[in-house]
Image (cartoon, grey):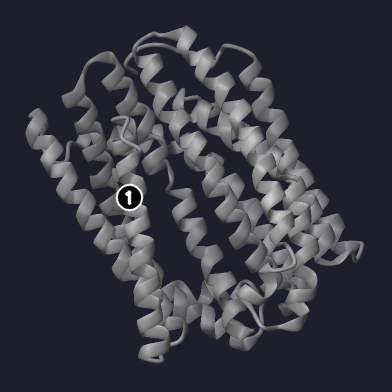
Amino acid sequence: MDALGGLGIAGTILQTIVGLLVFLAYATTPTVARRLGFGDRPGAIRAGIDGMWLALVLGIVLLVVGLPLAGGVVDLFGSSTGASSAATTYLSVSLWGLPGMLLVIAATGLLRGLQDTRTPLVVAIAGFALNAALNAVFIYGFGWGIAGSAAGTVIAQWAMAAVYIVMAVRAARSSGASLKPGFAGVAGALSSGGWLLIRTAALRASMIATVYAATTIGVTELATLQIALTIFSTVAFMLDALAIAGQAMIGHSLGASDVPRVSQVSARLVQIGIGCGALLGVVLIALAWLAGPVFTGDAGVQQQLPVIIVVMAIGAPLAGYVFVLDGVLIGAGDARYLAMAGIVAAIVYLPMLAAAVLLGGGLLWVWLAFIFGYMAARAVTLGLRARGDRWVVVGAR
C-alpha cells in the first residue's frame, strides 16, 4: 500500500515536471512541420536540434536543483510516513533520467515534424519493453523494491535518448544542418514554448489538485486514484496519438498554405477521436471489474476501482474530442489561446473539486468532477476556438 501510494505521489511530481516541459515536443513539432511544408528541410532539422540542446540544458538544471529538494517536495503532499519515504526514494533515483527523458521529448518533436510518427512509436515500444524487463530484474531479482523500479526507468530513458541522438546526427549530416547549438534557435524554442508552458502548468495544477484531494480522503483512495490515473493516462496516450498526428499534418499544411486540407484534417480527426473514445469506453467497461486484482491485492482498492473506471469509460468520447482539438490547435501554433483556455478550465474545475471534498462525497465525487467538470470545461473552450478560423495562419512561421 505504501509503495503504491508513494509511487502515486512521485509519479505525479515527475509527470508534472515532464508535462510542463512537453512544450519541447509540442513547440518543436509544428515549427519543424511548417518549415518542412514550406520547403526548408535543413531549417526544419536545425529547429529540432536546437530544441534538443534546450532539452539537455533544462534536464541538467532540473537534476541539480531537484536532488536536494526531493524529500521536501514529497512532504508537501502530507501523506503517511511510509508512502512519503517510498515517494522520496523513487523521485531521487528517477531524477537522474530526467535529462534523457527531455531529450527524448524534443527529438520526438523533431521526427513528428518531419512527418515520421512510426519511428517514435518503435522507440517507445522498445523503451517500454526494456523498462519492464529491467524492473523485473531489479525489483524481483535484486530485491531493490521501488528504487529498482525507478532505476529501470532511468536506464530505459537514456537508452531511448541515445537512439534519438544518433538519428538526429544522421539527419543533420544528410541535410547539411549544423549540430552546434544556435543561441537564436534555442532562445526561439524557449520563447515559442512559453505559452504552452502556461497551458501545461494549468493542466498539471488541476491534476495535482486532484491527487491532493484524494490524499486528504485517505491512503486507500490515493492508491485507487493512482491506478485510475494510470489507466486514464493509457487511454489518453491512445487518443493523443490522433492529436500528435494532427500536430504534424496541420503544421505541414499551414506551412504549405493548404487551407482546405487543414479543414479536412481537423474535421476528420475530431470524428475519429470521438469514435475511438467511445470504443475505448466499451473496452473499459468490459474490464472494469477485472482491473483491480491486476494492479493490487488490497481489498479496499479493488472495491472502489470498478465504479471509477466506469465513470472514466462514459467520459472517454469527451476525452477523445478534447485531445484531438488540443493537437489541432498546437499544430497551428495557437499557443496563446491554449494557455488562456487552460487557465479558464482550471478556474472552472477547482471549485468543483473543492466542493466534492467538502461535501464528503469521497473519491467518486472527486472523479466525477474531474471527468465531467474539468474535461467538459476544456471541451467548451477548445470547441469554441476550433469553430472559427482565427487560428488558421499560413506560412513558414
Q: To which quarter of the image does residue 46 belong?
A: top left
Please tell me which residue is depicted at 34% across the width and 76% down the height of the picture. Answer: 134
Q: To which quarter of the image does residue 38 belong?
A: top left
Please tell me which residue is depicted at 74% across the width and 55% down the height of the picture. Answer: 285
**In the picture, which quadrant includes the C terminus?**
top left
Q: What SS does tag 1 mark?
A: helix
Looking at this view, is 265 or 8 the one in front?
265
Q: Position of residue 187 (x, y in %)?
A: 29, 36
Q: Position of residue 193 (x, y in %)?
A: 41, 37
Looking at this view, is 347 or 292 the one in front?
292
Residue assigned mark 1: 122
Q: To which quarter of the image does residue 12 belong?
A: bottom right
Mark 1 crowdedness (10 Å alpha carbons): few <14, some 14-19, many ≥20:
few
Q: Position of residue 211 (x, y in %)?
A: 67, 64
Residue that sits furthest to the right in the current view: 359
Residue that sits furthest to the bottom in the current view: 143
Please tell me which residue is depicted at 45% across the width and 86% down the height of the picture. Answer: 145
Please tell me which residue is depicted at 28% across the width and 46% down the height of the picture. Answer: 54
Position of 259 with respect to 216 (left or right) is left
Position above or below: 87 against 60: below
Looking at this view, is 227 or 76 the one in front?
227
Residue type, mark 1 in image: Val
